[in-house]
Image (tube, rainbow, N blue to C red):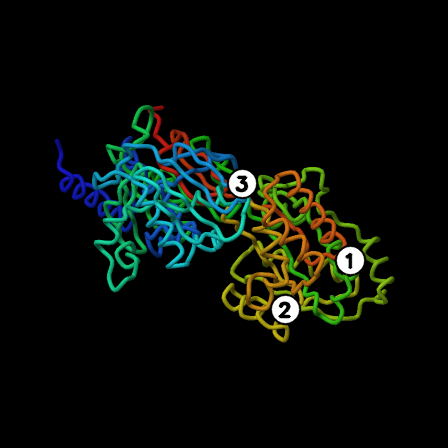
Amino acid sequence: MVSKRKKRLLSLSIALLFIVSLAGGGFAVLAQDMSTLVIALAGSPPTFDPLAASDSRVDTPSINLYNTLLQYLPGVTEWELELAESYEQAEDGLSYTFTLKPGVMFHDGTEVMAEDVKYSVDRLVAVNIGVARSLVMVTGADVIDDYTVQINLSTPFPGFLGALSRLYILNSELVMANSVDDDWGQTWLQNNDAGSGPYVLTSFTPEQEFTIERFDDYFKGWEGNHVDRAIFAVIKEESTRRLSLENGDSHWIQVGSPETLDALSENPAYTINTDPTLNQLYFAMNSRHPILSDARVRKALSLVYDFEGHVELARNGYAAIAKGVLPPGIVCFDGSTPESAMDVEAAQALMAEAGYADGGFELTMAYQGTSPEETAAMQIMQAGAAQLGITIRPMAIEWPAKVQAYSSQETAPDVGTVWMFPSLPDPDQFFGRLGHSDQGGGGGINFSWYSNADNDALLEAGKVELDPEARCEIYKQVQAIWDAETPYVNVVVGMALSASHANVKGYQWSPPHSYTQNVYQIYIDDM
C-alpha cells in the first residue's frame, strides 16, 4: 500500500512536472493519463479558506475538498441533502435543526460531528467575510447531541437552505489546532484544507497550480467513473490556455472570448460548453441626475438599446436577451415576462412628452474598459442614444474605482454597466441588492441610487416571506414598479464558456456555483 506521504510526494512531482511542461512547450503524455485530469484556469485562488467561497476562484477547490449540509444537484437549481440526513424548520422560520449522517469522515480520519457544524457556523458569524454576506441572518448554532445541531436566525429567510450550499463544514479540531492569535485558522487555511470532500489538497504553488487527490474514505464512495487526481493549472493568457488544450497539455480550459470558442468548435476533437448562468448584465440609470430623475427619459434610453445587436456583436451569440430583472433559474422568475426590446418610436414619444424632443444633453457611461463586451455595450448605447439627440461620453473604469465613484451622488456616473453574480438563486440577490434604498451610496450596489418607499416595503416583505406563492406575488409587484420606473435596463443573461477534449465526460455546469469544476463528476473516457 502506498503511504500518504508517498502519495503526496507523487502528486507534487506530477504538478511540478506539469509546470515545467508549460514552460517547455508541451507535455501531452500527462494529458493522456486517464487517472489525472488537467484543468486550465484563468485565475489562482487567493486562499483555500472556504469562507471566501463567494469568490468562484475559492469555490472551485472548496466544492472538491469539502461538503455542506445540503448541496445543489448538477445542472439545476434544486438541492439535495449532503452531510445532513434530515432537517426540521421551526414554524417561525427562526431555527433549523439538522440530523447528520453518521460515519462521514474528515480527511484526517476523524468523524464529522455536530460540534464541527457549530464551529463552522460560529466561525462564519465571527469572521464575517465572503459567504457570510448571504447568511447575515445567522446568529449561531447549538449542539443538541453528537449528530444533531440547531442553526439559529435573527429573521426568517426563505433562501436560507439554498445559502447553506456554500457553508462548507470544517474539521473543528484541526482548524483550532492551527489557529494563530484567535484568527479562526484563516492563516493556516490559506494553504491547507480541513474538509471531508472527495479530494484532498496535496500541493499548491500560488499563481501556478494546485493539485487535489482522491480521498479513499469519501462517504459517497468511488463506484462508477472518477479520476484519482486533478491538476488545476493557472494560465492567465487565453491564447496560452487554448494552446495547452490543442497540444494535449490540458483536458479542460476556461474560455473568456467567444472568438476562441468559435475557433475550437470547428474541430470535432473538442467538446464546446455554453452553459446558461444566473449572471445578468444591467445598465444602472442614475435616478438622482437632473434629467434621468424623469422615469420617461430612463425608459426612453432603455428602448433605443439594440439588445439583439449586443448578443450578436458583443457575445457572438453566446448570451440570451434578459426577460425582466431575474434570469431564468432564479426563484420567482416569471417566464411570461417579455424580452427587453428596442422601440425607437416609443422612445422618441417619451422624450417629447418629457420635454426633450431633440435631446440636446450629454450623459457619462461607466464601463469596464478591459472588457470587450462592456466596451461594445457602451458603443451600442452611444449609437442608440444618438437617435434621441443624446451624447454618451465614455467613462472607462475598473471595478474598485467604479464602486468608489458610485458611493457619492457627486461622483456617480449617469449610466453604468453592472453585472450581478448571485451566490444563491434567490430573488433578493437581485431586487434587494440592486434596488433597496439602503444599498445605495456605498452601502451596496444600488448604482441607480433608486429610492422608493413602496418598493422598499415590498422588498423587505419579500425577503422574509416563507410562503412560496405569496413571495413570488410580492416580487411580481416589484417587477411592475421597476418596469414603470426603469432604474435599470435589463440587458443580457451571460453564458459560461469552456472547452475540453471530446473524451472528457461528466462535466455539468452548476448555476449556483458559477465557474466551478466538480471533479467528482468528471472522468476521462477511453475512446
Secondary structure beneath disc 3? loop
Looking at the image, residue 33 sits to the left or right of residue 473; the answer is left
Q: So how many labels did they put on this image? A: 3
> Which residue is found at the position 66% from the left and 51% from the top?
490
Percent coordinates x, y for residue 513 in the rendering: 46, 43
Q: Residues within 10 Å of mark 1 (few under 14, many from 20)?
A: many
Q: Which of marks 1 and 3 is nearer the N terminus?
A: 3
Percent coordinates x, y for residue 316 in the rendering: 59, 45
Looking at the image, residue 124 sits to the left or right of residue 485; the answer is left
- Looking at the rendering, in which quadrant would you find the C terminus? top left
Q: Is residue 249 depicted above or below 526 in this figure?
A: below
Q: What residue type is labelled 2?
A: Pro
Q: How crowded is mark 2: few (under 14 residues within 10 Å), some or many (20 or more)?
A: many
Give the CA distance from mark 1 to mark 2.
18 Å
Q: Is residue 355 depicted above or below 117 in this figure?
A: below
Judging by the rendered image, the residue that carries numbered circle 2 is: 413
Q: Which amino acid does label 3 sit on?
A: Glu
Q: Do the residues labelled 1 and 2 touch (CB within 8 Å)?
A: no
Q: Earlier in the sequence, mark 1 or mark 2?
A: 1
Badge nearest the viewer, 2 or 3 = 3
The residue closer to the viewer here, 465 or 110, is: 465
Percent coordinates x, y for residue 42 in the rendering: 40, 51
The residue closer to the viewer here, 217 or 468, is: 468
Q: Are marks 1 and 3 in contact (CB under 8 Å)?
A: no
Judging by the rendered image, the residue that carries numbered circle 1 is: 300
Residue 103 occupies quadrant: top left
Q: Which of marks 2 and 3 is nearer the N terminus?
A: 3
Q: Are marks 2 and 3 in contact (CB under 8 Å)?
A: no
Secondary structure beneath disc 2? loop
Judging by the rendered image, the residue that carries numbered circle 3 is: 91
Q: Which amino acid does label 1 sit on?
A: Ala
Give the CA distance from mark 2 to mark 3.
45 Å
